[in-house]
Image (cartoon, coloured by chain):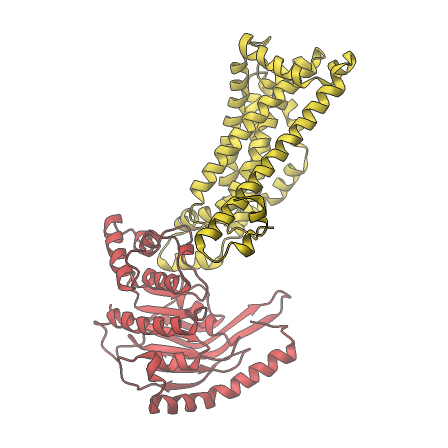
Amino acid sequence: MTNTDLATGTAAAGTRPEELQAAHRARRRRRQTLVHLTQVLVLVVVLGGWQLLVQGDQRGIILYGLPSGIVSRLQTWITEGTAIGSLGAQIWTTLQEALIGFVIGTALGIVCGIALGRIRFLSDVFGPFIKVLNAIPRIVLGSVFVLAFGLGLESKILLVIVLVFFGVFFNAFQGTREVDRNFIANASILGASRWQVTRQVVLPSAFTWIIASLHVSFGFALIGAIVGEFLGGYAGLGVLIKNAQGTFDANGVWAAMVIMGIVALLAEWLITRLERRLLRWRPAQLAGPDL
Amino acid sequence: MRATSPAPGQGPAIELAGVTKQFTTDGGLPYTALKDLDVRVAPGEFCAVVGPTGCGKSTTLTLVSGLERPSAGSVAVHGEPVTGITPGVGFMFQADAILPWKTVLDNVSAGPRFRGVAKRTALTDARDWIRRVGLAGFEDRYPHQLSGGMRKRVALAQNLINEPEILLMDEPFSALDVQTRAKMSDELLSLWDLTRPAVVFVTHDLEEAIALADTVVVLTAGPAATVKARFPIDLPRPRVVQEIRFERQFVDLYQQIWEALRAEVDLAYTQTTQLGGKEAS
């Protein structure tokens, strides 16, 4: 089909279903190509502009870094390792802190959120405390943890737990409160005990809320691990960034950031897959009008 | 204690005596939904409760099921006062209450499994009931993949699998289109015939009430609703819901009951329009 065909496609393609389908498919493909091309263009303009503007200026290179410099820094790190050990070991250290903290923080958040959501007395008692704890800037606790638990993994994991917990907790709590009363009444009449209602009605229903918080929480987990390493540590991407900053190595800071970005994207992809699996029962989103 | 065992006259399946139910509204003011309500339902009896909007029909059901307690008076099921969730009761809600994250099979088998029946037995029973409500082949579907009528059938199977001695139904078919509704009513009657639980069927549709029930109870307009009148429906069974309404006897009964109901509907209507929806529902 040529372009002119497509322009008049909807009207002229006639009523035969294959024609309509083909026209629809062609239109969608064309649109997608356009989107991808624009995306590439945006990248080229931003990175190319950066490269061209900073390239000639020695001071600029030190202050802002260069895309080409970032790429070569990544290459060195991958092939020769970093000043504090192999790149893989740094990524693994940070990831370990983030993951362990994330899992513990999420589990605690879900358990506490559902418990407080289900048991009125608990929420009345602990509600104000949790509000106060949530109000203080928790990142500062990182310093406390480093002082108390040293420069190893523990202090970072604790910071991650604290950062992850509250987001998950509030969503689990709200999700528990929003469960359709009819579902609970129905399950109770069918013979479910309070625990069975919690397990089979409240938890799955609140999961829509909980999983939404996981996307944000994993970001917090990475931030917690990195900041923890900033505040004091032997290894990890945070230490790498801190060292790069200390030696006026902007490219190093950017390179570590690129690695973090890739890790975060991978985690996001995994969480989305988990979400699809757990929320299989939900109706698929219907496509909106193609505007 | 299935419908086969209790002989008629052995004592009512449900007895509400002098029941008053008060709620506190959001403003903290007391609102009397029911006042001095007396209703008796015999074992195996199909009792329809009709009344104008907001007269506390649904409240009656929550009292019998044990979801709520009366403020005064007594509620007894099979002679036992209701203190918690009443055992042996099924409840079909107006809105969908089947669990959307469970498949049809898991939804229907939920009751027995909550009660500790072995998984294998529960699933076999569930398959039987799914077949009986005409959903064979849909066992692995999720509720959102079913039509409204099919979801109602799942709810029906979910309740009947527990073999309740009492089935409470709160306008269960009101969300369905007219044809589906008539079909569902017919199916309800034939399924009811299998185990013959006592049924309390709340509806605002008088035609539906007469077509289904042995007894129609008319409530007065709320607040402080109570029983206005009670009409035995002696139409022969089995009935075909869509056709029975053309029979002479049906029309006579309809006129008779409508006389009683009309005044209450008019009263409720003027009340709600005067209040401007202040005390809606």
A55 vs B35, left or right, is right
Counting from the top left corner in percent of width and height, residue B267 is at 56, 85
B216 vs A228, left or right, is left
The residue under the point 28% across, 58% down is B136
Counting from the top left corner in percent of width and height, residue A214 is at 53, 37
A170 vs B135, left or right, is right
Counting from the top left corner in percent of width and height, residue B210 is at 37, 82
Q: Report whether residue A252 is seen.
A: no
The residue under the point 62% across, 18% down is A255
Q: Report whether residue A17 is seen.
A: yes
Q: B229 or B142: nearer the eye?
A: B142
The residue under the point 55% across, 44% down is A2
Q: Quadrant of residue A64?
A: top right
Q: Is residue A37 above or below residue A23?
A: above
| Image quadrant in which the C terminus of chain B is located | bottom right
Q: Is residue B112 above or below residue A56?
A: below
**Chain B painted colour:** red
Q: A190 or A39: nearer the eye?
A: A39
Q: In this view, does A31 lie above or below A43?
A: below
Q: Is residue A210 above or below residue B15?
A: above
**Chain A painted colour:** yellow
Q: Quadrant of residue A85?
A: top right
| Image quadrant in which the N terminus of chain B is located | bottom left
Q: How many labels does the image show?
A: 0
Counting from the top left corner in percent of width and height, residue A44 is at 66, 27
